[in-house]
Image (tube, grey):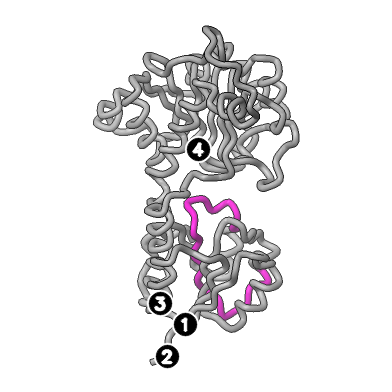
Amino acid sequence: MSKKKILITWPLPEAAMARARETYDVIAHGDNPKITVDEMLETAKSVDAILLTLNEKCPAAVIEKIPENIKCISTFSIGFDHIDLEACKKRGIKVGNAPHGVTVATAEIAMLLLLGSARRASEGEKMIRTRSWPGWQPLQLVGQRLDNKKLGIYGFGKIGQALAQRARGFDMEIHYYDIYRAKPEVEAKYNATYHDSLDSLLKISQFFSINAPSTPETRGFFNKATIEKLPQGAIVVNTARGDLVNDEDTIAALKSGRLAYAGLDVFAGEPKINEGYYDLPNTFLFPHLGSAAIEARNQMGFEALDNIDAFFAGKDMPFKLA
C-alpha cells in the first residue's frame, strides 16, 4: 500500500521528521525562504494532509482556497489563532494542535523573564557587552528579590500552573484569575489564591504574568486601564500571545515608571515589533523562545503527527480543535 502524502511547511526537529518519513511520503518545505500561502495552497493539491506552524496564517479567505482533497490540518503549536476553525468546520476539515509539549519549556521562560526583569539582567548584560562597566558600586543596577512578592497569573491552565510551581520555589505568593476556577487540590498544591475577577487580581499583583490564550475577549486587554489597576512599579511578563498587549500603552507606562519592567517573549506582528521597545532599558526581550527546548519541540512534532495518524486511522484526533 502506498504511503499517504503530507506537507510539512517548516523543518521540524530530526526526531519528528524521521517519524514522519517512516510513516508518510513527506513533502518538506525549507525555512529559507519560508513557504508562502500560494505555495502552500499549490502543494496542497498533491498531498493528503498539512502539518503547519504558527507562521502560516490561515484565515477564512485562505481556508476557502484549500483544495477539496485536504481534510486534515495539524499545527505544530499550542496556539491556534492563526487558523480560522469555523471556516475549517464549514469545509469539513479536521484540525488538531500540539498542546502539551510546550508546558514546561514555556513556564521556564516565564520564570526567566520574571527573574531577569526583577534583577535587571538585560541592563547588566548590555553593560558588559558595551564595555561600559565601571566596576562594582553599591547602587549599581539594584533590582528586587522575588521572595514574598505577590505573583498574579492570568490564565491558570497547564502553563500557568507550571509557572506557579516554579515561582513557589522562589517563595513567591501565588494568585490567579481564570474563567475556570481550579480544583481545591490544585489550589492547595500551589498554595494559590483564586480571584473572581481580573480587576481583583491586578490590584495585588506586584508581578503579573500573562498566560491566557488569544481570543476576541483577551486581545489588547493589557492596556492603559489595566496597567492603572496594578500596583505602582509592577513588573509584567508575557509568554502567551503578543496581541494581548497594547504596545503603545505598555511602552508609555515603562517610560513613565508606572511599570518598572516588562519581560516579553511574544509580540504583536512579530518578528516586526513596536519600535518603541528597542531603546527602553527596562525591558527584557526574547524572540519567542517559549517552547524552544529540544524536548518540547520533539514532543510538539510527535503530537502534531499523532493527530494526523489518528485521522488516517479513522479515529478522533487526540488533540482535536475542529
Asked which quadrant contains residue 159, the reply is: top left
Q: Are marks 4 and 3 in contact (CB under 8 Å)?
A: no
| Total labels drawn | 4
Residue holding disc 3: 312
- Can residue 305 be seen here? The reply is yes
First along the sequence among labels 2 and 4 = 2
Q: CA distance from mark 1 to mark 4?
A: 37 Å
Query: Amino acid under label 4?
Result: Ala
Tell me if I can see residue 89 in this picture: no
Q: Could you tell me which secondary element the residue under label 4 belongs to?
A: loop
For badge 2, the amino acid type reads Ser
Q: Nearer the viewer, residue 279 or 230?
A: 279
Q: Which residue is mark 4?
A: 212
> Any mark on residue 2, and which?
2
Q: Reading the chain from its start, which is encountered first: label 4 or label 3?
A: 4
Q: Are marks 1 and 3 in contact (CB under 8 Å)?
A: no
N-terminal of the two: label 1 or label 4? 1
The residue positioned 43% from the left and 56% from the top of the image is 297
Residue at 62% x, 78% y: name it.
43
Task: State which region is magenta.
Answer: 64-83
